[in-house]
Image: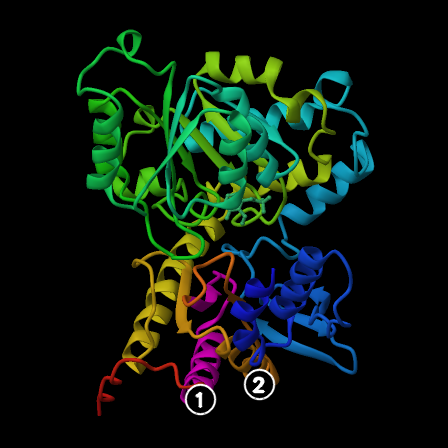
Amino acid sequence: HASNLQGYAPICLGLEDFYIRRLYLRIQDCFGRPICSPPDAWFDVVERVSNDNNKTLKRTTKVSRCLNLGSYNYLGFAASDEYCTPRVIESLKKFSASTCSARVDGGTTSLHTDLEECVANFVGKPAAIVTGMGYVTNSAILPVLIGKGGLIISDSLNHNSIVNGARGAGATIRVFQHNTPSHLEKVLREHIAEGQPRTHRPWKKIIVIVEGIYSMEGELCQLPEIVAICKKYKAYVYLDEAHSIGAVGKTGRGVCELLGVDTADVDIMMGTFTKSFGSCGGYIAGSKELIEYLKYTCPAHLYATSISPPAAQQIISAIQVILGEDGSSRGAQKLACIRENSNFFRSELQKMGFEVLGDNDSPVMPIMLYNPAKIPAFSRECLKQNVAVVTVAFPATPLLLARARICISAAHSREDLNKALEVISRVGDMVGIKYFPAEPQKQ
Ligand code: PMP
């Protein structure tokens, strides 16, 4: 315990926000008693969101309006929308805010069945099941899909909901190097022979789990290569599209559409509605047999209250807008806008000399800070200048790979982005995080 404390102490010096409060609580937990009074956490309260992706924060002493570069509101649906909002209000009147029942106990409204059909069609699979929370979709469904005697091979940077789901499954877990197909193949080869039929190997089932866009890295999955390897070794592919569904691909259908992968080659397609669709909940899409099996076995279906009807209506309406079924071209414009905004912002940051992770077309853009002591300096200076950024550090990233994670939205105007770039550049100079020489400005 003492060595834990010494290990953490130097890092504590530069931090006084969320992370340090968590550290205090952890250390207190180690000692089993309060060690001293922790400083206040720095939780701002959001008072209001708006259509232009600004938000109003209520801080202890003042209320300020700032440009929101932290929300997963990729297509700008997390605000009032001329098509979605009136329909959501109608659904609230008709079905109320909650079904107060699990799906099998009277918690299935026509909205729930419509939503499952709509999601299956949208992602390109025969059937889908929805749950009330994205996190629970991974953590509750994985243990139903695979158990003792099974083998899970998981990307080393997969989301915590996947890690917890995999641990709860009781299967053997192996990890492959983040987004590295050659290492995935190496791990597979260590456990089975190439071409061995599923019935003749020591594993009841093998599932390889990857994400479409990695939420802390902004990288696109090397899906075509991973799918080819899984075919060769007859392993199932589980794809978490929390950050890619709705956000990338010509018609918003995610990484399969963007990277030219046939959805028939992805066995289990998972995603959440909390990002591009401005709602909440999660889904699994797959074969009719798989979804039928999940309906009878998944605890999130049997024991948890079904997704809130207005949330379900929001998703259906957002998908209709994306597909142009509202009779307008707003969906296509949003998709074009998020792509242009993301590519513009990424290349401008790089020109300024920042180290930016991730791939083109990805709206997730981590700016590397490295030293965790730079977290409060960077985020507070940006906020003082009315730009809200999210910073992430240990345990969400390795200790010395702290970063600011920018999320770009179709709701950002070019003026917003230029303002944000100016602020980030100034603060970047102040905090010392421009690790590369800036490109000379064109005359
Ligand atoms: N999967 C991934 C990859 C995520 O990033 C997240 C959360 N951002 C989740 C699942 C959980 O989703 P939700 O926040 O909708 O519960």
Above or below 41: residue 120: above
Mark 2 CB lies closer than 8 A to ligand 1: no
Question: Quick one: 318 or 207, which is closer to the camera?
Answer: 207
Tally the marks.
2
Q: Which mark is residue 412?
A: none
Residue 390 at least partly seen = no
Q: Which residue is mark 1?
A: 426
Measured as percent of width and height from the top left, residue 340 is found at 35, 63
Q: Earlier in the sequence, mark 2 or mark 1?
A: 2
What amino acid type should be assigned to the residue bearing mark 2? Gln
Q: Nearer the viewer, residue 382 or 56?
A: 382
Q: Give the residue drawn at x 47%, y 21%.
A: 146
In the image: residue 381, left or right of residue 339: right
Query: Depth check: 354 or 338 in front?
Result: 354
Whole-percent x, y for residue 71 in the image = 56, 60
Instruction: Report helix, strand or loop for mark 1.
Output: helix
List the single residue furthest toward the top: 199
Quarter of the image where one finds residue 2: bottom right
- Tell me which segment is drawn in magenta: 402-429
Q: State yes or no: residue 414 in magenta.
A: yes
Any magenta on residue 160? no
Q: Report the residue marked by disc 2.
A: 385
- Report which quarter residue 279 is drawn in: top right
- The reply to whether dot 2 and dot 1 touch (C-beta < 8 Å) is yes
